[in-house]
Amino acid sequence: MKKMIITLLGTCLVLYAAAAMAADQTVVPNHIQRKAATKFSDVYGKGAGPNQAVTADLLSSWLNHRDANIRAWACYALGEVKSPAYAEQLRAMLADQDADVVRLAAKALGKIQDNEAVVVLSEIMLDQRYCCNVRCAAACSLGMIGDGRAMPALCTACKDGNSRIAANAAKSKLRLASSK
């Protein structure tokens, strides 16, 4: 009974956030956005929900929202769904102006294991214009994807002056080497 009530509350939270975002309200509290994305993945992310495609499609429509927080949490939630159907849209989000959107899109592409994102993620990881968090997310995602084309970029990033980027690149490089 308790689990059913929690799931029901989570679903209500998703519906509240969906209604607010669909109405294009920009004053959706951050904690509501985070909980909606988290609840979405908890309830439907394991492929058990009959409404998964509809809800994921709604989330994918939020990728074009004018509020960067909504775009970022849509990227996060689509990463939790792990459906290759949204990979192209997530790759497009790597060009977003907001660092959190790019970071969460990179992570989502890693979870999806999108081979088509390897070149762009490699470029982002090596580009000093991106912040450390974005570059680290790109490095981690390259390891999750497991495509050997990332190895030269990972080797270069292992020598990066930023120790966090070098460490993440080294972990991904080991992951790639052990997957062969």
Image: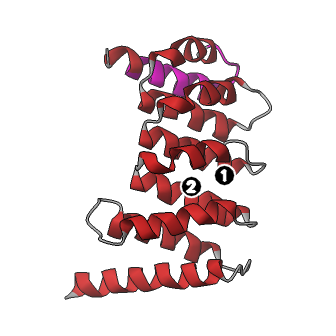
Residue 111 drawn at (x, y percent): 43, 42
Q: Is residue 47 left or right of residue 89?
A: left
Verify whether residue 140 appears in magenta. no
Q: Quadrant of the C terminus?
A: top left
Q: Marks 2 and 1: in contact by CB < 8 Å? A: yes
Please name the residue shown 56% across and 77% down the image: 32
Which class describes the residues within 10 Å of circle 1: few (<14), some (14-19), or many (20+)?
many
Residue 35 drawn at (x, y percent): 49, 72
Residue 108 drawn at (x, y percent): 50, 46
Q: Which residue is mark 2?
A: 75
Which class describes the residues within 10 Å of circle 2: few (<14), some (14-19), or many (20+)?
many
Residue 42 visible from this viewpoint: no
The image shows residue 90, relative to residue 114, as above or below, that is below
Please name the residue shown 40% across and 19% down the image: 176
Image quadrant assignment for residue 70: bottom right
Dot 1: element = helix
Magenta-colored span: 159-175
Image quadrant assignment for residue 18: bottom right
Q: Which mark is residue 101?
A: 1
Magenta stretch, main secondary structure, is helix
Q: Quadrant of the N terminus?
A: bottom left
- Given the image, on which type of amino acid does mark 1 rest? Val
- In the image, 166 versus 102, the foreground residue is 102
Please name the residue shown 72% across and 47% down the image: 99
Q: Is residue 65 left or right of residue 145?
A: right
- Given the image, on which type of amino acid does mark 2 rest? Cys
Please name the residue shown 57% across and 41% down the image: 106
